[in-house]
Amino acid sequence: METTGDPRFLRSQEAIITAARQLLLREGPPAITHNRVAEEAGIGRATVYRHWPRTDQLLAEAMATVPLPFFDTPSSPYIAWLRRELTAIARQLEQDDVLAVTTTLASTSLWDPAMDTRRAGFAQIVADKLADGLREAEQCGELVTTSALSDAAALAVGPIYYRATIERASIDGETIERCVQAVGHWK
């Protein structure tokens, strides 16, 4: 029986994560299935199921190894940059697989300390990167924030997450614009 300390177990786990990460980067979340990951890793499908019985768990693990692409390259005009970034987040949350991982991460973190650490890490990365971009916008005179930069992610991304997860509705341009305006006064 395999155990977490068994070198074979660890090698297959690493092969699965590597394969899932490569598929995720190359083809996106829908490519993360037990069959596709097993094929990419060159191992049996049953081995993938032993490590991650559910696809959403496997996708969450793969996503944890991929850098978050949001808010990476702030540029002037910053209002257009923020619109693009928020629209990209909204489009990602329209994908069932991404939505499943996002909600799984949020709900599982309530009782799983490892998942809560992962959730907190994601949240901090998003908050910091957005705050950095908005700080640049302030320094360039394009924005006057109306609340603490530490609240910007909740103000700008929060409504998008709510609309996608709780309402299960699409996010239109008007919603994106309200999120952009929520962070401050644009010049």
Image (spheres, rainbow, N blue to C red):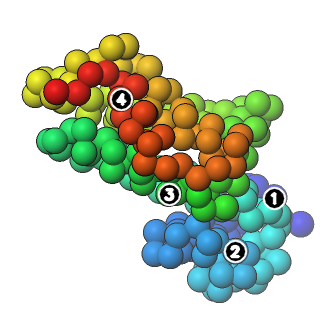
Q: Does label 1 or label 4 sit earlier along the sequence?
A: 1
**Residues at marks 3 and 2, CA–CA distance in whole angstroms:** 21 Å
**Residues at marks 1 and 2, CA–CA distance in whole angstroms:** 23 Å
Q: Quadrant of the N terminus?
A: bottom right
**Residues at marks 4 and 2, CA–CA distance in whole angstroms:** 39 Å
Mark 2 lies on residue? 33
Q: Nearer the viewer, mark 3 or mark 2?
A: 3
Of the numbered discs in the image, which one, if any, rests on residue 91? 3
Q: Nearer the viewer, mark 4 or mark 2?
A: 4
- Above or below, comparing residue 80 to residue 148 in the picture: below
Which of the 4 image quadrants contains residue 35?
bottom right
**Residues at marks 1 and 4, CA–CA distance in whole angstroms:** 52 Å
Mark 4 lies on residue? 181
- The reply to whether residue 128 is visible in this rendering is no
Q: Nearer the viewer, mark 3 or mark 1?
A: 3
Picture residue at 80% right of the left edge, 62% below the top: 54
Mark 1 lies on residue? 3
